[in-house]
Image: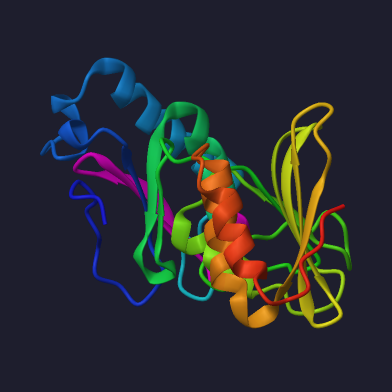
Amino acid sequence: MNAGCRIIVTMSLVIVVTPADAALSGAAHLDDLPEHVRDDLEALRDEVRERFPAADAVGETGALTRRPEIEGVGVVIHPGVITRPLVVNAVMRLAAPRQLLVACPELGLVADPRERIDVDVHRRPTTAGADIGDHEVRGRPHGTLPWITHELLRQLVHRLEVDGDRLELEVDDDRWFRYERAGGELLVQVADGPGVPVLERTVAADRADRAAESGWEWARGTGGWAEALEGAAEGDGASAA
């Protein structure tokens, strides 16, 4: 958890948005931050207020249980139980271009803009630990998480439970890393640039951790993703497409 996050003790889930720079997130007060960072935090607070109504009286139903406020150098947001997936996703989208860190301790979420990977999620409206949701397409949910941590990627891969469930890490049309549940196994496909043949491996479901490790290494641009994927597929009838 980032040292600059201030959490209010409450029974409801809490999202806290702070500057990603540790030197700034450790400040005691908003006035201690550079003007552009103050402006970004205040603008995010106002956008969340405008987009999601708060319950202003006991018994009312709102997307938020109370209005977002700045405490210390963090915007504190309290989503309602039903609206948690939408609020978490929206806050991350709003924070992304401002280079702000989003933390939600109850979900194990620390979304750092310096570790950003785009993720598309098919079929599952919510995912344990990430809460991704987009209800625009009824019956076929599809959401995009602006960035994701190593642990959340592992959780997402483990949530591919039904044939056809798919998770994609995508840079552009020519570079992507795709997981798909197929026949009780994971089909992993990797496109690594124009003209490069698509690599395909079949991985046993119980080796999902190794498959997730490979995807993380690929997205981070390290050279270890191929070795991790070979290790995940070892003994599982690996084949190249």
| Residue 130 visible to the viewer | no
| Residue 185 visible to the viewer | yes
Name the spot of residue 210 as percent of width and height, x first.
Answer: 55, 67
Is residue 162 part of the magenta span, yes or no?
no
Point out the residue furthest to the left here. Answer: 28
Instruction: Using the rendered view, name the quadrant where residue 44 is placed.
Output: top left
At horizontal 89% and vertical 68% (from top left) the residue drawn is: 139
Q: As displayed, is residue 86 above or below residue 100?
A: below
Figure quadrant of the N terminus: bottom left
Q: Is residue 239 left or right of residue 38?
A: right
Q: As displayed, is residue 150 above or below residue 159?
A: above
At horizontal 22% and vertical 54% (from top left) the residue drawn is: 6
Residue span colored magenta: 65-86
Name the spot of residue 16 as percent of width and height, x first.
Answer: 35, 51
Q: Is residue 19 left or right of residue 115?
A: left
Query: What colouring method underlies this structural image?
Result: rainbow
Instruction: Using the rendered view, name the quadrant where residue 113 is placed.
Output: top left
Q: Is residue 192 left or right of residue 38?
A: right
Name the spot of residue 134 as percent of width and height, x first.
Answer: 74, 56
Front residue (pair 208, 229) = 229
Front residue (pair 102, 64) = 102
Count of numbered tags: 0
Instruction: Using the rendered view, name the quadrant where residue 197 is placed.
Output: top right
Front residue (pair 122, 176) = 176
Q: Is residue 33 left or right of residue 20?
A: left
Name the spot of residue 230 as percent of width and height, x first.
Answer: 63, 61
